[in-house]
Amino acid sequence: MKPVWIVDDDKSIRWVLEKTLAREQVPFKSFASASEALSQLDLGAEPPQVLVSDIRMPGESGLDLLKQVKTRFPSLPVIIMTAYSDLDSAVAAFQGGAFEYLPKPFDVDQALELIRRAIDESLHQVGASSEPGLVPEILGQAPAMQEVFRAIGRLSQSNATVMITGESGSGKELVARAVHRHSLRSDKPFIAINTAAIPKDLLESELFGHERGAFTGAAAQRRGRFEQAEGGTLFLDEIGDMPSELQTRLLRVLSDGNYYRVGGHSPIKANVRIIAATHQNLETRVKEGLFREDLFHRLNVIRVRLPSLRERREDIPILARHFLQKSAQDLGVEAKRFSDAALKHLASLDFPGNVRQLENICHWLTVMAPGQQVDLADLPPELRDTPPLATASDWESGLALEVDRLLAGGSGQVHEKLTDSFERVLIARALVHTGGRRIEAAQALGIGRNTITRKIQDLGLDGGRNNDPEQAA
């Protein structure tokens, strides 16, 4: 890991941060002024992992340093240190692209936690590389995505036919392009066609081309997608919707390697790698007689299953940051950033539209979110009002998301509301478990009989004194 740079004219501040980072075995370099740090960069020094800078220093200020560093290295997280009362400086720091600001005097643990967050941001930063053009093909740290990456690697030395399965919007074409880009055919064309988007009567001509005069309107010879992809890769998206007569023609090409243009009489040799994709269950369509079994087996040589976004929730923050950067670049505006609460809420959602839906949301936020930081309240209403998901094994994460939601809403009394909700559920479930018997419920929960009675009354739970056969006991 590259070092964290500390820039502050106050020697005591530098000493505290140096000792803290040294204790945590985080590499660092210290500078007494912004000009010293900039001089290192001018001499060709590698940029830091994270930059921590004071805002008021002799000579160039921390904001000057922030501006110059962000111009050179847009994705570098910069933490600006400032006084509690210096609100204008804090706002200016955020407007200049600072990752966060650290108010002085600061708690050492608070500073360390903030630096660790910035390091994590830097290590997983995507779509804003300091080197132009370095945009990852596919993003994913989830185990399911790592399996996809391994499959792409194994396919790099093969010309085998590939079948990619996955829900709509999960990124099947991206995987197909990655397989091609890492294959022996990477210097040849990659041609994609969505077989469900082209009318049945035109699909044959689109795939195989046609001769002049082959049908009304065919005024000239036309090369089809197979010819366009010669030597390279032909990607057949939504193959499950291909008409049956076209399935027969495709099977013939895969079987003997030859095809004919529509209206043609001379066979054309096909030197094309086929990658097919579908969101449907082809085995089921084969059983229903909607897809040829022999074609299925021809296409299903190597299968790569692409997981849905809800199966790789840990990738949602990475993807969301990437799409926010990408949208800003496309629109020519300054990139926004997500708050922790917003990212946690996004990571809790189902995303039926998968990666494509998340990308569209990030584009909407780039246009519509009012500030540079995207908070929970800035999300589209249909997402903001969706309650966070919580499972039996992840109830603490669900609780954390609910806390974030309430805090972002500024409703106040968060502790009281959540405590009452927690106790209400706890006692209600215990009473269900014991058939309404309070003494047994109290014993099961490890609380006193008087305590459970009082809480039942305070929380407005059903099961009054007259309904409890053991109340008098």
Image: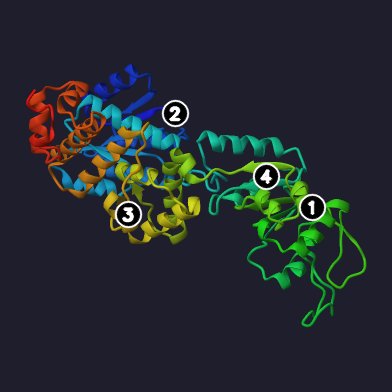
Name which residue lies at 34% across and 42% down.
344
Query: Hey, which residue is sitting farthest bottom in the picture?
Result: 216
Q: Name the residue under label 4.
A: 179
Name which residue lies at 56% across and 44% down.
138
Q: Mark 3 points at which residue?
A: 379
Query: Hey, which residue is sitting farthest top in the picture?
Result: 23
Q: Which of 317 and 291 is in front in this view?
A: 291
Residue type at numbered disc 4: Val
Which circle, 4 or 2, is nearer the viewer?
4
**Mark 4: secondary structure:** helix
**Mark 2: secondary structure:** loop
Q: Name the residue under label 1.
A: 272
In the picture, measured across the screen, residue 123 lies left or right of residue 299, that is left
Residue type at numbered disc 3: Leu
In the picture, measured across the screen, residue 69 lies left or right of residue 283, that is left
- Going from the N terminus, do you reach mark 3 or mark 1 first? 1
Which circle, 2 or 3, is nearer the viewer?
3
**Residue 407, image quadrant:** top left
Q: Name the residue under label 2.
A: 2
**Mark 1: secondary structure:** loop
- Label 3 and label 1: CA atoms lie apart by 45 Å
- Going from the N terminus, do you reach mark 1 or mark 2 first? 2
Q: Residues within 10 Å of mark 3 (few under 14, many from 20)?
A: many
Residue 56, position as x, y percentages in the image: 21, 39
Residue 23 against residue 100 in the figure, above or below? above
- Going from the N terminus, do you reach mark 2 or mark 3 first? 2
Residue type at numbered disc 2: Lys
Q: Nearer the viewer, residue 229 or 439?
A: 439
- Label 4 and label 2: CA atoms lie apart by 32 Å
- Label 2 and label 3: CA atoms lie apart by 34 Å
- Label 1 and label 2: CA atoms lie apart by 45 Å
Q: Which of 393 and 320 is in front in this view?
A: 393
